[in-house]
Image (spheres, grey):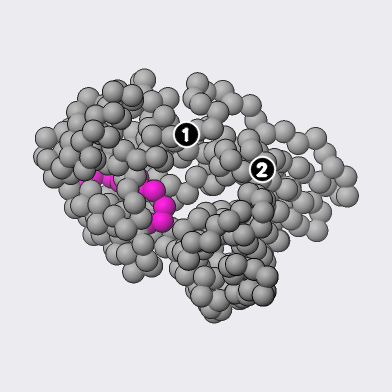
Amino acid sequence: MAVRIGVIGAGTMSGKYHCPSLVALRRPKVTLEAICDLDEAKAKKHARRFGFKHVYTSMSEMFATARLDGVCVFTPINATAPVATEVMRAGLPVYMEKPPGATLLEANGLARTAEKMGVPSMVAFNRRYVPALVEAKRRAEELGPVTYVEAVQLRSQRLEPRFVRGTALHVIDAVRHLAGDVVRVKSEKRRSPREKTNIWMATLDFASGAIGRILIKPHAGCNVERYVLSSPDYTVFAAGGLDWLADYPGLLEVHVGGKKIRSKIPAKRVKVDDHVYWCGFYSEMAEFVAALSEGRAPRPSVAEAVQSVKLAAMIDTGKSGTL
């Protein structure tokens, strides 16, 4: 039976990435039951474009009248926590854009609400589902335990004050996904006289015994996200994230024993726009739908995402300590 999905939010991310993912999953896995937005014109446009059955401007009305198995929340950051909370209080599984709340307090509150209501939750950290990073993680695990992981995030003219807690949260979570939970972080925030914003650096100790580093430079004249997974015997290089990054649709290199071996990202085998697939949005939506169909919890849950939010807050302020 198809999973009946409602969407709250008819903005840019919803229209460019998430709803096209739902359309690609629609037959036979998904029924596009309802779209809700405070702007009725936007909601109606989404309904026409993607094929939603019903249009709403009120969440409570949608919960009361639409037959839903799960709800996707694609709202501005300051609205995510209150909207997702209402979804969970209605007893519905929720899939939400990152970050899960505007603050660590809100993220913890969402995790508590999900536990109290007993409903599945998922946070849209698309880097966990980017094909290049998925394959890099698989290849590294085949070769043996990762002892070192590194992430570099470079951007051009990104001077907003909450860059680390917003955009850089993606690479912080990706590093956790690649190497496991963090037990300790040493953070440093610096700015040279010629820089217009800070540069953030963090050294990480993982529960697995691995170590890692993250470099975040929002004003670097390029748009790049690159990752390294390494041990004494191998190193895997990977890149990917969004369709406007330099290495799109993805980069993968595997080196073993000092030699580069043939590396290839698996080909796309589903009918969906390239940018939706290679940026991981299709696969993460497929995870949410599959989890609902199978009666299991999707990943990552809000509870799993809380450590990423906490790490981002610590790195942002240059704080060091245990987690």
Residue at (38, 34) in percent of width and height: 15
Amino acid tagged 2: Ala
Question: Can residue 184 be seen?
Answer: no
Residue 282: mark: 1
Residue type highlighted by circle 1: Tyr
Residue 199 percent across, percent down from the top left: 62, 68
Query: What residue is at 48 percent from the left and 38 percent from the top?
Result: 281
Q: Quadrant of residue 208?
A: bottom right
In the rendered image, which quarter contains the N terminus? top left
Structural crowding at the residue carrying mark 1, measured as other residues with C-alpha within 10 Å and reported as few (<14), some (14–19) or many (≥20): many
Q: Residue at x 25, y 52 (%)?
A: 83
Rendering coords of residue 267 (x, y %): 63, 26
Judge whether residue 34 is colored magenta: no
Q: Mark 1 near mark 2, Cβ–Cβ under 8 Å?
A: no
Whether residue 211 appears in this view of the structure is: yes
Give SS at disc 1: helix
Viewer-closest of 121 and 144: 121
Q: Which residues are magenta?
A: 91-100
Percent coordinates x, y for residue 191 in the rendering: 63, 73
The quadrant holding residue 50 is top left
Residue under numbered circle 2: 246
Q: Secondary structure at mark 2?
A: loop
**Around disc 2, counting alpha carbons within 10 Å, would you say few (fewer than 14), some (14 to 19), or many (20 or more)?**
some
Is 106 displayed left or right of 40 in the figure?
Answer: right
Give the residue displayed 35% in from the left and 40% down from the top.
11
Where residue 313 sits: x, y (%)?
Answer: 47, 70
Q: Relative to 141, say whether 267 is above or below.
A: above
Q: Which of label 1 and label 2 is nearer to you?
A: 2
Q: Main secondary structure of the magenta part?
A: loop
Does residue 253 sit above or below 5 in this rendering? below
- Specify whether residue 98 is painted magenta: yes
